[in-house]
Image (cartoon, rainbow, N blue to C red):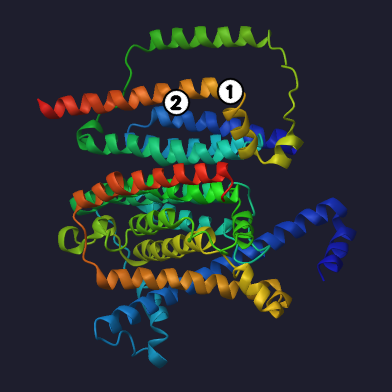
Amino acid sequence: MISSVSSFLASFVGEPMADMILNIVIILIKVAVVIVGTLLHVAYATYWERKVIGHMQLRLGPREVGPFGLLQPFADGVKLFFKEDIIPADADKPIFYLAPVIFFTSALTSLSVLPFFDGFAVANINVGLLFLLAMSSLGAYGIVMSGWSAGSKYSFLGGLRSASQVISYEIAMGLSLVGVMIMAGSLNLTEIVRAQYNYPTGFYAIPQILGFFVFFVAMFAETNRLPFDLPEAESELVAGYFTEYSGFRFAMFFLGEYTGMLIMSSIGTVCFLGGWTLPKFVMEALPFLSELPNFVWIVVFLAKVYVFMFLFYWVRATLPRYRYDQLMNIGWKLLIPLALVNVVFSGTLKIMGWF
Amino acid sequence: MLQQLFFGYYAFMIIILSLLVVTRGNPVHSVMWMLLLFFHIAGLYLFLNAEFIAAIQVIVYAGAILVLFLFVVLLLNLREELSLRQIAGSWPAAFFIVAALFITVTAALGAYVQGPVGSYSIEAVRSETHTKALGRLLYTEYLFPFEIASLILLVAVVGAVVLAKRKLRS
């Protein structure tokens, strides 16, 4: 199919030009598929969260709109879209407009390097893991700028809290992934998954248990979720950095937060749980599995991501919020030393040839 | 042709953005332009096949250092600072220094000699991946300068902690 389109195009613009156009079109289609798929996931992540937390708190959650409340996310979307867009008189307008865009775009851009199944990533780059860390640090700008530009004290405090929290935990998160980089010998996400498949246990969470623990805690702080949701602590700061936002600008923060959770879950899946693969011993026990076409394995990838998402909800329904100094103590005095120990151990074991 | 176009775009944008950074009246807007500037510098690194340096440029400069700038700027009393239009006084002195620097650089450009071609050609770096090539060189051939650099950073960290602690005690 692709070759016939290519030769058809080549008759108009010549061979090299036709290849380039075709490549760009294929990339655009991939981007569209990934973004639409993610946004649908985000919509139903909110529904699922409300259901899970509802049942944990002996309620039923949304059930009025559509069967079992399944159309609730769309009703919410329509509601947000038609709300009045209010801009505070004291706001710094260009930055107030820009902040939610930065936040949401940085979350969506991270999607471009994630390998959803073998051979499918919008951009299969060699520094994929570093790219993800870079994009998550860019997201902090959206938060700080939204807090500052609104000209409100609650927003400002929320923005400051969030920024210092995100940069503190970014160090722990980066260091916790170093063990995975050492074991896989690569920063390319596809290569990391393949290296895990060839590892005896099939995923790195077992030998890298320390790194996995640090990553898991840092994941909650990076996405500003409970028990580390101090930037938006309702009882102290109204809603934190997005207090002054309404309508679709607020929706962008909301979508960005859930996209961020999905991305953190995907990083955890790719780096610690073996991505789209099942462990090798399972594949050898059930040989018919390797006959399946590549794209079927996205089911395995998504199942692992859903496990992480469920843990996000579970923790939210279970744990109370930390105090701010406790948060900083955990980050700097517990997680970073633990991550450093893990780096030293992994490096030593790698040199001794045990990994 | 495409390469010159790319380089021209980055060089032009870097100059324009640097000008925007130093001429804004509001320091927060300066920081935002600087963020864009760092991304263009990272783009320039990518253009030179240095993907690792490009990623580090964004993580370290945009992700850490600039956020700290932003913190300092935010904690200042901005509403008063905003009325400050001109940051630097006495432009003739500044003009003289910059002109002298420009003439020196222009004169030095004539003496430019292309260095010898090493073993790390573009193909070699691509096949090994840039991160691996850089890591191997840093930890074998250039280990000593690398260790000196890290020692200097360690001294800076210890110094910062000592200064902060002394203020706490008094």
Query: Label 1: how many residues lie within 10 Å, few (<14), some (14-19) or many (20+)?
Result: few
Please indicate, yes or no, whether residue A235 appears anywhere in the rendered image: yes
* Residue displayed at 27% across by 50% down: A330
Q: Secondary structure at mark 2?
A: helix
Where residue B117 sits: x, y (%)? 75, 22
In the foreground, B91 or B116 = B116
Where residue A302 sits: x, y (%)? 53, 72
Identify the amino acid type marked 1. Answer: Tyr
* Residue displayed at 52% across by 51% down: A180
Whether label 1 touches label 2, CB < 8 Å? no
User: What residue does disc 1 label?
Assistant: B142
In the foreground, B5 or B43 = B43
Identify the amino acid type marked 2. Answer: Ser
Q: Is residue A167 left or right of residue A109?
A: left
In the foreground, B143 or B17 = B143
The answer for which chain carries disc 1 is: B
Mark sitting on residue A347: none
Q: Is residue A15 above or below residue B42?
A: below
Where residue A157 sits: x, y (%)? 21, 49
Q: CA distance from mark 1 to mark 2?
A: 12 Å
Tally of numbered discs: 2
In the foreground, A328 or B61 = A328
* Residue displayed at 56% across by 8% down: B103
Q: Secondary structure at mark 1?
A: loop
Q: Is residue A134 left or right of residue A141?
A: right
Q: Is residue B69 above or below residue A332?
A: above
* Residue displayed at 74% across by 35% down: B124
User: What residue does disc 2 label?
Assistant: B150
Please indicate, yes or no, whether residue B26 appears anywhere in the rendered image: no
Position of the N terminus of chain B by quadrant: top right
* Location of residue A340 by image quarter: top left
Q: Is residue A155 above or below residue A247?
A: above
